[in-house]
Image (cartoon, rainbow, N blue to C red):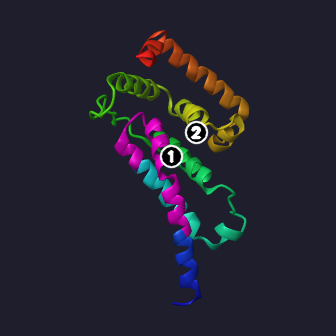
Amino acid sequence: MGRTGGTREAKDGEFLELVAGHTGRLYRSACLLTSGDTHYAEDLVQEALGRMYVLWRRSAWTGGRYQVENPGAYAHTVMVRTFLAQQRRRSSGERPTGELPERAGREADRALRLTLLDALGGLPPKDRAVLVLRYWEDRSVEETAEVLRVSSGAVRTRTTRALARLRAQFGETLAELAVR
């Protein structure tokens, strides 16, 4: 094979390393964004990685103006933006199911998980994205603002309002579920 083939193989190898190292984290975040819809979460991760692969194959990606310092974090950014774009386009006829398949584990953990996923599902997509980025992925306000393409103040406001909605919905119930 010529010189181009070796470069492509090297790029593909680097991309596969990225996928192997970050797919689990992407999937867990996607599950939270989609309120526990595992099938939608898988599709979301696949879509984000597909978009990343297209960028990755460009020669400018590795040495030009599209240089990214942290490809894993950028993959999360692509996934969140993909989620928000899909939510804007989502048909009004689609309804998420209220029942999740049974999972192994303690009953209290299952109840808490389902309660939290239901509560996240009740939030608007941008509020859900803010909470996932800030508290699940442990990103700063500035990083979250950059991912969502909003101001830091908007992230703080959305965070405060989303947490207030969750607190109003749960009251003391969440503390009881967490203690079990």
At horizontal 46% and vertical 54% (from top left) the residue drawn is 47
What span is colored magenta in the figure?
Answer: 14-42
* Amino acid type indicated by mark 2: Glu
At horizontal 30% and vertical 34% (from top left) the residue drawn is 104
Q: Is residue 129 above or below residue 11?
A: above
Mark 2 residue element:
loop
Q: CA distance from mark 1 to mark 2?
A: 9 Å
Outermost residue on the bottom side: it is: 2
Mark closer to the chain start, 1 or 2: 1
Would you say the residues marked 1 and 2 are in contact, meaning their CB atoms lie under 8 Å apart?
yes
Q: Is residue 23 above or below residue 12?
A: above
Mark drawn on residue 137 = 2
At horizontal 37% and vertical 38% (from top left) the residue drawn is 37
* Amino acid type indicated by mark 1: Arg
Looking at the rendered image, the quarter that the C terminus falls into is top left
Q: Is residue 37 magenta?
A: yes
Q: Is residue 167 magenta?
A: no
Outermost residue on the left side: it is: 102
- Is residue 153 left or right of 22 when viewed as pictured? right
- Is residue 19 left or right of 41 when viewed as pictured? right
Outermost residue on the top side: it is: 172
Predominant SS along the magenta part: helix
Q: Position of residue 7 (x, y in %)?
A: 58, 79
Q: Position of residue 51 (x, y in %)?
A: 52, 59
Q: Residues within 10 Å of mark 1 (few under 14, many from 20)?
A: some
Q: Position of residue 98 (x, y in %)?
A: 31, 28
Q: Residues within 10 Å of mark 2 (few under 14, many from 20)?
A: some
Q: Quadrant of residue 157?
A: top right
Q: Which residue is mark 1?
A: 25
Mark drawn on residue 51 = none
At horizontal 48% and vertical 58% (from top left) the residue drawn is 20
- Is residue 119 left or right of 78 when viewed as pictured? left
